[in-house]
Amino acid sequence: MISWFLRRLGQILPTLLILSFGIFALQQLMPGDPALILAGEERGDPAVLAQIRAELMLDRPLLEQYGHWLWRLLHGDFGFSWRIRVPVGELLLDKLPVTAQLASMSFVIGVAIGVPAGVISAVAKDKPLDWLMNAVALFGISMPNFWLGIMMILLFSVQLGWLPPSGYVPLWEDPWQSLATTIMPAFVLGTGVASVLMRHTRAAMLGALEQDYIRTARAKGVVERSVIARHALRNALIPVVTLGTIEFGRLLAGAVLTEQIFSIPGFGKLVVDAVFNRDYPVVQGVVLATALIFVALSLVADILYMLINPRLRAA
């Protein structure tokens, strides 16, 4: 187990190094001059622009800027927001709980709907229930999040008045109000995850149900419910776990449109505001934090593989 972990770490570190340079270099391709935005009314004064560029190291070569940024990053310093002069690390820690709550709720909704629906669809292959499940999943994949979000606001907030149309209340301040402000955006994101998980669970279950060990279990008289739950589903979950970690990472990365529609102050809204303001350190911090989340989730997925399939522990 330790040797496996060291091998994985040896693969991850070069990846993160290359990714960090890509994040920093591609950031420079964004149109516009941050100094012009930060100068405000004094943007016409060349001396002010030169001073701002010197303070932010924008007048230095790209590699020198990257080396300075990477050195601070290795010491836990993500830099300061150019716009509001607040440490990027504080912004990330402030927004992460918001996005984590929304992503967790969305993921739970997606798994609770998608996995059982995929199993039922596979068991009822080529029957009306299977066709219905596939039609609903296709609708969920095709439906834009912003449209569903607007329709839910129109129905549950404007027409029925059951839920607030936007805003966010921290979970530790008022759990019920926090649930009320996040349930609609969580459902909007969760339906997309559920549709993807349903399709992959169905395909994995159909492959598992055709294996010899399933026929052997049925020939031995094992109850059909046990055949599906203990034998077929357990082996079919391996590709679903891979997809699930990717989807959860995507949710944590911040659903930009959904957070904008419901005014959720998470990663998505943070990075959109930073892009519009040419706030490079904030954009770099959010993208790098997202990459670290995906790396951590890939490790979690590998561990789950071993828990689901004992044969992988000896590999």
Image (cartoon, grey):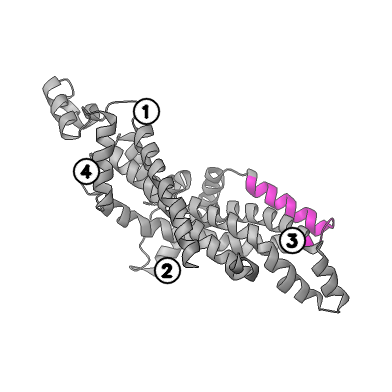
User: Mark 4 and 1 residues: CB-CB less than 8 Å, in contact?
Assistant: no
Q: CA distance from mark 4 to mark 1?
A: 22 Å
Of the two numbered discs 3 and 4 in the rendering, the one whose residue sits closer to the viewer: 3
Q: Position of residue 103 (x, y in %)?
A: 47, 57
Q: Amino acid at mark 2?
A: Trp
Which residue bears the numbered disc 4?
Answer: 84
Q: CA distance from mark 2 to mark 3?
A: 37 Å
Callout 2 environment at 10 Å: few (<14), some (14 to 19), or many (20+)? few
Q: Amino acid at mark 1?
A: Leu
Q: In the image, 163: left or right of 75?
A: right
Which residue bears the numbered disc 1?
Answer: 29
The quadrant in which the C terminus is found is bottom right
Q: Which mark is residue 226?
A: none
Q: Secondary structure at mark 3?
A: helix
Q: Nearer the viewer, residue 83 or 27?
A: 27
Q: In the image, 139: left or right of 103?
A: right
Which residue bears the numbered disc 2?
Answer: 176
Residue 313 found in image quarter? bottom right
The answer to whether 97 is drawn above or below residue 228 in the figure is above
Q: Is residue 301 magenta?
A: no
Q: Residue at x 52, y 48 (%)?
A: 149
Q: Is residue 125 magenta?
A: yes
Of the two numbered discs 2 and 3 in the rendering, the one whose residue sits closer to the viewer: 3
Q: CA distance from mark 1 to mark 3?
A: 45 Å
Q: Which residues are magenta?
A: 121-141
The answer to whether 4 is drawn above or below residue 131 in the figure is below
User: Mark 4 and 2 residues: CB-CB less than 8 Å, in contact?
Assistant: no
Q: Secondary structure at mark 1?
A: loop
Callout 1 environment at 10 Å: few (<14), some (14 to 19), or many (20+)? few
Q: Nearer the viewer, residue 195 or 296?
A: 296
Q: Position of residue 49 (x, y in %)?
A: 16, 25
Q: Position of residue 222 (x, y in %)?
A: 82, 78
